[in-house]
Each structure stands twice: as C-alpha cells, then as structure tokens.
Amino acid sequence: MMMSLKRKGIAVVAAAASLFCFATPAMANNSSDSG
C-alpha cells in the first residue's frame, strides 16, 4: 500500500537532491564570496 508512496517520496527526494546539488555550486559561483 505505502510502496508507491514511498517510491514517490524517494523520487521526489532524489530530484530535490539533484536540484540542490546543481543549484548550490551555481549560487556559490554566482556570488563572488569564495575565492
């Protein structure tokens, strides 16, 4: 019953993590704070 819900949650978390990993370096690159 909760299998689909769990898989959906995992997919959402994976997508969020991928987005986060992609956006974080972009933001760090955008702001000239480090370096």
Image (cartoon, rainbow, N blue to C red):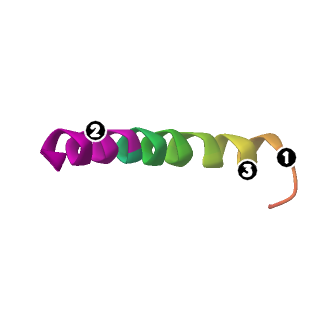
Instruction: Determine if the magenta segment contains residue 17.
Output: no
Q: CA distance from mark 2 to mark 3?
A: 30 Å
The residue carrying mark 1 is 31
Comparing labels 2 and 3, the label whose residue is closer to the camera:
2
Where residue 27 sits, quadrant-wise, is top right
Proximity of marks 2 and 3: CB atoms separated by less than 8 Å: no
Residue type of the residue flagged with mark 3: Ala
Query: Amino acid under label 1?
Result: Ser
- Along the line of sight, which residue is nearer the eye, 34 or 14? 14
**SS under mark 1:** loop
Q: Which residue is mark 3?
A: 28
Residue at 35% x, 45% y is 14
Labelled disc at residue 8: 2
- Residue 33, quarter of the rendered image: bottom right
Q: Are marks 2 and 1 in contact (CB under 8 Å)?
A: no
The residue at the point 28 percent across, 38 percent down is 8
Q: Tag 2: Cα neighbours inside 10 Å, few (<14), some, or many (≥20)? A: few
Q: Position of residue 9 (x, y in %)?
A: 33, 45
Q: Main secondary structure of the magenta part?
A: helix
The answer to whether the residue labelled 1 contacts the one labelled 3, judged by CB atoms less than 8 Å apart, is: yes
Residue 22 at what x, y percent from top left? 53, 40
Look at the numbered disc 2 and give the secondary structure of its residue. helix
In the rendered structure, the answer to whether residue 23 lies left or right of residue 17 reads: right
What is the spatial separation of the Cα atoms under label 2 and label 1, in whole angstroms?
34 Å
Q: Residue at x 66, y 40 (%)?
A: 26
